[in-house]
Image (cartoon, grey):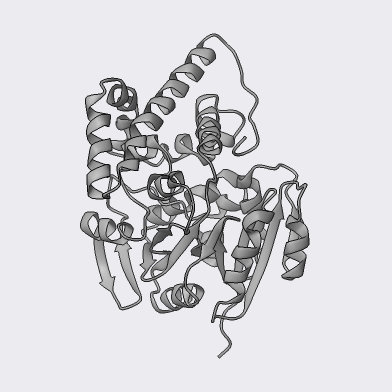
Amino acid sequence: MQSPLVSIVIATYNSAGTLELVLQSIKKQKYKPIDIIVLDGGFTDETLQIAREYKCRIYQNKRVQPTYAKHVGFLEAKGKYVVFLDSDEVLGSVDSIKKKVSCLEREKDVVAVTPVGYKDPKNYPFINRYINEFGDPFSFFIYRLSKNHKYYLRSMISRYLVVKKTKDYVVFDLSQDNNLPIIELAAMGSMLDKSFFLTKCPEVTKVPELIWHTFYLLNKNQKLIAIAKDDPIFHYSATSLKRYLRKINWRIILNVYLQKDHALAGFSGRNNYQKGFYSFKKYLFLPYVFLLLPVLFDSLYLSFTRRNFCYLIHLILSFWTAFLITYHFVRKQFGLSYKLPTYGD
């Protein structure tokens, strides 16, 4: 039998620095056939030249933001299964696609498979490791779930209902859990069953921001999710602290000002699906930071458990995040708006 086609969706924006690494990792995959779709939000470098060399299908993302690129990619995907891979995410195993397809073909109630987590590239700055684990201080506070390949699967097994384990993957049923983890299936090399979302969640085709919340939609339909073993993703997220601080500012602007529909793609959108303590916990972030002792305890805890005192930066990043949240909320109360910058700017 012919193997089902897999479409890999990659959103780009001046991504020449890492895109070739991503495409090389796809080329090395043992699984075939694979269809690669590149959605470009504007470029001044060699992004599209690289994409053409690897025979990618290329579309222009005139709305620039990655949400719209991923949505267009999902709609244009010809494959039975769709993988969302960011332009700085490199497949760490030649069996990555093969394992995910195998899981979806064998487990009829599984409609999405994620990798085992992020792995730090060699010789990259420490801030990249922090991002790979928690994303940002606010996400750490809310979910306390590491996406590092050493901890992610272990943490999920300890917290949530496991329905099946094999040598290649672990299947979870989270449909009855009120305190769901943060799992963004539109990134990290996650694979989705496209036909399921087209038939059971057709709203995804009409509302671009819902592409980030497919995890909650599958739970709403009582479907299962799996994590592939020995399937790390090398994440080249931030080359400098300065760039990362801009990303934090971008995320806060997105959620505080609720500009157009952009905020639906972030925490404000996820909050619509959160139940239990999570729906209230967001209000405790500022006390968590400004009381000092709680955030200091977590900074020391991370430093000792990871055996790396660079994790004390969690304290500094938390204060920066709390300051920006306060600043932008005060601006908003005075009726001041804020132009949404390009992602990371």
Of residues 78 and 243, the one nearer the viewer is 243
Residue positioned 31% across, 56% down in the render: 174
The answer, for residue 26, to whether it is visible in the render is: yes
Position of residue 55 relative to residue 46, above or below, is below
Residue positioned 42% across, 39% down in the render: 136
Quadrant where the N terminus is found in the figure: bottom right
Quadrant where the C terminus is found in the figure: top right
Residue positioned 22% across, 33% down in the render: 297
Q: Position of residue 276 (x, y in %)?
A: 27, 38
- In this view, the residue farthest toward the top is 334
Q: Position of residue 121 (x, y in %)?
A: 47, 58
Residue 299, image quadrant: top left
- 155 with respect to 29 (left or right): left
- In this view, the residue farthest toward the front is 123
- In this view, the residue farthest toward the bottom is 1
Of residues 243 and 307, the one nearer the viewer is 307
Position of residue 329 relative to residue 299, above or below, is above
The answer, for residue 207, to whether it is visible in the render is: no
Position of residue 243 relative to residue 114, above or below, is above
Q: Position of residue 248 (x, y in %)?
A: 50, 34
> How many labels were placed on the picture?
0
Position of residue 335 relative to residue 319, above or below, is above
- 74 with respect to 228 (left or right): right
Q: Position of residue 258 (x, y in %)?
A: 55, 28
